[in-house]
Structure formats: C-alpha cells, structure tokens
C-alpha cells in the first residue's frame, strides 16, 4: 500500500514538473527585448505588457511601446519550436522533446513589422536563422512562405519553417485579437 | 526518436581492370533525445553500419547552465569541418560524403570527453570547446598510416585509453546572410597502449612508448552559402603531425609530417527552370588533398597520396526527408593513376 502511495506521489511530481516546464515565457527575455527595443524605438521608449488570454500566453507576450506617452508600436516575444533534442526534422505534436527558441518582433503602430530578432537559440542545429540579414526578409507587409518570399537555409529547414509560421501567427494575433 | 539511413550502389571503372559493383545498406542511424527537465537532456545516436556493425555515434548529457552556455559530457562528435557533426544524407550532395571527410579527418569522428558549447544569436556566433581522449595511435600495432592517417585510429568510445586529454574547438560565424563560416582546431597527441604499465624508471620502455605516439595539430575552415536557388560549400584542412620520424621508424609506417586539402562545391536547384515542385539539384565538386604534403627526412613523399577528385552529380528530393542521389567521380593521383566510379543511392531522414 505504502509503495502505491509513493508511486502516485512520484507520478504527480513528474506530472507537475513536466507541466511546469511549459509555463509562461522566462522573465529574463524581457531584459533582452528591452535592449533591442531601445535600438529600434530610441532611448525614450517605454514598454508595457498587455494582458492576453492563457492559451496565447503560453507562447507569446505582447507589449505596447510608447515614447513620451504616445504609442510608437508593439513588441511581441514568441516561443517557437526548433529541432527535436538531438536532431532536427518536422515538428510534431509531442512538444516535450523539442528544443525551443525565443524571438522578438517589433511592429510599428500600424502593426507592420519593423524588425525581427532572435533572443535565444540553444539548439545545435538551425542556429543560422538568427542571421540579421536573413531576418530582414520579414520586414514587409505580407504573409510569409518558405520558398516564395522567405529563403531556405541549408541545414536549418525546421527552424526556418518554424519561425516563418510563428511570424505569421504573431501578425494575425496582433491584428485580430489585440 | 528519429532516424536516418543510406543505401548505396557503387560501380568503379578502371582502365584495364574489371571491378565488381558494390551494393550496401551503408548505415542506419537511430536517434534518441530525452529531456529530463528544462535544462538537462541526453542525446544519443545508435548506428548500424553495413547491416552488421553496431556503434554508438554519440551519447552525451547536455546541461544548459545559461542560455549561452551548455555543459556537455559523454561521447561527443568532434567539431571539425562540415560533415562530421551534420551528416544526415539529405543535407549533403553526392552519394558518399566528400572524400576529404575520410582522408583528412576521420568522419564520423567521435571521442569521449567533456566541454562547453553555446550560441550567441545577437553576435551571430556559436562556439564549442571540448577536452577529449586522443585517437589511438598504437595498440599492439600501428593505427596511423600515410594514406588516411587518422581513419583507423578512432577509438569510438570503446574501452578508450587516454594519457592526457586533447583539445578540440570550433567557432562559427553566421552574421552574413546565407553564409555560415566555421573555424575549427584540434591539438593533442595520439594515445598508445605501450604507456600502460610502463615503469617510470625504465628509460628504454619510456623511449619505446614515446615513439608510439604522434602530436596532432589540425586546423579546419569550412563555409556553406545559400542564396535562393544557388548553394555553395567548401572545406579546407591543414594538419601537422610531430614525432613522425620516431613513429615511422618504430612501426614501419609511412605517416607524413603534414597534410593539406580542400574541396569546393556548387549546386543549383533547377526545379523552377523545369517547372517542377520537387527540388532537383545538379552539383559539381572539386577536391584536392595530399596526406604527404610534407614528410620527414627519412621518407620520400608518396605521389599516390597526392590526389584529386572531380564529382558531378544530382540530388533529387522526393520530399524534405527523402533523397535519391547519383553521381560520377573521377579519382586521380599525382602518378596519373585514374579511377572512375558511378554511385547511386537513397537517403532518408525522419522523426
């Protein structure tokens, strides 16, 4: 009987710890974002987080950026899934074993993209997407598609697809729901 | 869990000699990654080569101490060149890995060790630094030779012998759009089983053991570039071996004092030209390498180790994870010996 309780306790522990793994975005990303936003909007800018629903908050954070109390744009931090631990291919539904990366998209007040920057990328594969020249491809008003208006990167297929999809998502979230 | 694999058909042609073709399920690799928690993961690749040989290709524990700092320990892939760490068949052209990945560095080169690795996206830099066991230079017989110096010396993590750790490192810069450049270094000495049980007082035994190791200093430069439909890549290596006079005298081998080589490859995806959806990439690769770039005073450079390879071929991607390949290779050495070979194969990669 005792054994059973301890195994149940262990199960709960494992379950809660794995849920905790996919809670909200880590705090230190905001600091990294702040540095980037200063470069994009100038030193006078201030940002404030906008509350969004829980289902969105798992992967996104939205901020309003203001300069002298006037709205100058928006910023979003988003979690995207890169390669699976130990390798890289099509993301599937089982997110637990995937490497994740975080990126920032700055929008002007018309909600058009000003800049995309990768804030954190830890995986061994696909890191080339952090290249600023490549990210420049997102600085226009469009729906993005790899091979059409976004170049592929050899050896980074999955991360390229993943960030492209995530940028499209950001645009629709910001424009539709906010 | 994931996997990749390759099946090859190779047909060499000589001038007057007849050769049998060779069909082979070259390799099948199973990948497992397990995340213990947000910061700790275990990564392993199990490889079945030529159906009958089973190897661990890599198996290491990764601890993410900081977003930019991973501590890794276990059986690690040596960061050298393009092909050693990233060799899924869908990311390189040609049925076989470039010849240089065999001759100038022993792909898949993996050793037991520990170190740090990380990525700084804002600076577009990636770094790796490991302390690992050295290749086995002598184990009841010489393991190094002049033709493919380090090929036979990989310990592959199997009952590894080590006297002092070797250092292996690499820096990648990807700040230019479409371009990823890597600079790798490897410094160390080979291992020898003659040091095992040697009395420190026995000058004769120590001298013999000293003759069974060589020093290695290797520098590797690699680059890959992609812009729209165009792709290019190249690797260049220079290696220095020390103590080769003593090693060769002791083992009766012909290890050179330095080796040098490079290849350059270009390809172009012609899917739009043909009006097809699937990627079709013809490519051409020129390789030049000499494992007797310099030799010690006791040795005459073997001209047959001064080699060139011209590879032309095509890669046809049925989808992202399945490729059909064919190529034609022309091998030549400085003695003007020629060999032609036709290769075809399939490669896949899935998860």
Image (tube, rainbow, N blue to C red):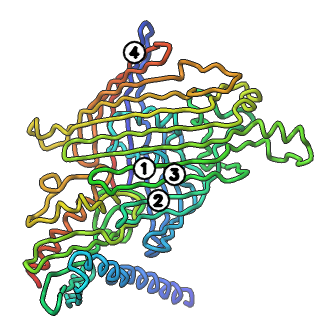
Q: Position of residue A113 (x, y in %)?
A: 14, 71
Residue pictured at 43% horizontal, 83% vertical: A17
- Chain letter belonging to callout 1: B
Comparing labels 4 and 2, the label whose residue is closer to the camera: 2
The chain to which mark 3 is attached is B
| Mark 4 vs 3, N-terminal side | 4
Whether callout 2 and callout 3 share a subunit is answered yes
Residue A175's spot in the image, x, y percent? 9, 78
Q: CA distance from mark 4 to mark 1?
A: 36 Å
Q: Position of residue A47 (x, y in %)?
A: 23, 87
Label 4 resides on the chain identified as B
**Which one is in front in this view, the residue at disc 1 or the one at disc 3?**
1
Q: State the residue lying farthest toward the bottom.
A: A69
The residue tagged 1 is B182
Secondary structure state at the residue bearing disc 2:
strand
Q: Kindly give the residue lying farthest to the right in the view shown.
A: B201
Give the spatial CA distance, label 4 vs label 2.
Answer: 43 Å
For mark 2, name the chain. B
What residue is pinned by disc 4?
Answer: B13
Answer yes or no: are tags 4 and 3 on the same subunit.
yes
The structure residue drawn at horizontal position 60% and vertical position 21%, both measured from the top left corner, is: B301
């Amino acid at each position: 009987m005792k054994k059973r309780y301890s195994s149940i306790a262990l199960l709960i522990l494992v379950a809660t710890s794995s849920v905790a793994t996919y809670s909200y975005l880590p705090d230190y990303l905001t600091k990294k974002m702040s540095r980037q936003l200063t470069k994009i909007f100038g030193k006078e800018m201030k940002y404030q987080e906008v509350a969004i629903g829980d289902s969105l908050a798992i992967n996104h954070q939205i901020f309003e950026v203001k300069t002298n109390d006037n709205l100058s744009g928006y910023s979003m931090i988003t979690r995207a899934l890169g390669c699976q631990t130990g390798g890289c291919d099509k993301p599937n539904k089982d997110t637990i074993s995937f490497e994740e990366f975080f990126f920032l998209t700055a929008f002007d007040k018309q909600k058009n993209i000003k800049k995309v920057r990768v804030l954190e990328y830890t995986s061994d594969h696909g890191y080339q997407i952090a290249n600023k020249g490549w990210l420049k491809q997102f600085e226009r008003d469009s729906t993005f598609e790899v091979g059409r208006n976004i170049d592929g990167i050899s050896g980074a297929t999955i991360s390229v697809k993943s960030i492209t999809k995530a940028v499209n998502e950001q645009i629709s979230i910001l424009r539709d729901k906010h | 869990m994931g996997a990749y694999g390759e099946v090859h058909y190779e047909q060499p042609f000589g001038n007057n000699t007849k050769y049998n073709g060779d069909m082979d399920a070259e390799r099948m690799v199973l990948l497992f990654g397990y995340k213990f928690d947000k910061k700790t993961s275990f990564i392993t690749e199990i490889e079945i080569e030529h159906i009958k040989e089973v190897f661990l290709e890599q198996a290491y524990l990764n601890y993410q101490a900081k977003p930019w700092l991973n501590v890794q320990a276990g059986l690690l892939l040596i960061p050298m060149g393009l092909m050693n760490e990233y060799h899924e068949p869908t990311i390189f052209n040609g049925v076989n890995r470039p010849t240089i990945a065999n001759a100038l560095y022993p792909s898949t080169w993996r050793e037991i060790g520990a170190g740090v690795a990380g990525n700084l996206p804002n600076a577009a830099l990636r770094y790796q630094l490991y302390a690992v066991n050295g290749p086995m230079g002598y184990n009841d017989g010489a393991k190094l030779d002049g033709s493919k110096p380090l090929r036979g010396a990989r310990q592959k993590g199997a009952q590894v012998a080590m006297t002092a750790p070797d250092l292996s490192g690499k820096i990648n810069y990807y700040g230019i759009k479409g371009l990823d450049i890597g600079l790798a270094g490897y410094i160390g000495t080979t291992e020898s089983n003659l040091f095992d049980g040697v009395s420190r007082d026995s000058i004769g035994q120590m001298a013999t053991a000293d003759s069974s190791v060589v020093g290695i200093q290797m520098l590797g430069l690699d680059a890959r570039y992609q812009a729209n439909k165009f792709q290019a890549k190249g690797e260049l290596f220079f290696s220095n071996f020390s103590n080769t006079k003593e090693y060769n005298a002791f083992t009766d081998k012909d290890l050179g004092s330095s080796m040098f080589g490079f290849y350059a490859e270009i390809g172009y995806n012609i899917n739009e030209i043909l009006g097809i959806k699937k990627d079709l990439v013809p490519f051409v690769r020129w390789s030049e390498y000499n494992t007797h770039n310099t030799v010690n005073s006791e040795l005459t450079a073997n001209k047959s180790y001064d080699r060139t390879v011209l590879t032309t071929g095509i890669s046809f991607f049925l989808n992202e994870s399945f490729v059909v390949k064919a190529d034609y290779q022309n091998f030549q050495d400085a003695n003007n010996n020629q060999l032609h070979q036709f290769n075809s194969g399939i490669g896949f990669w899935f998860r």
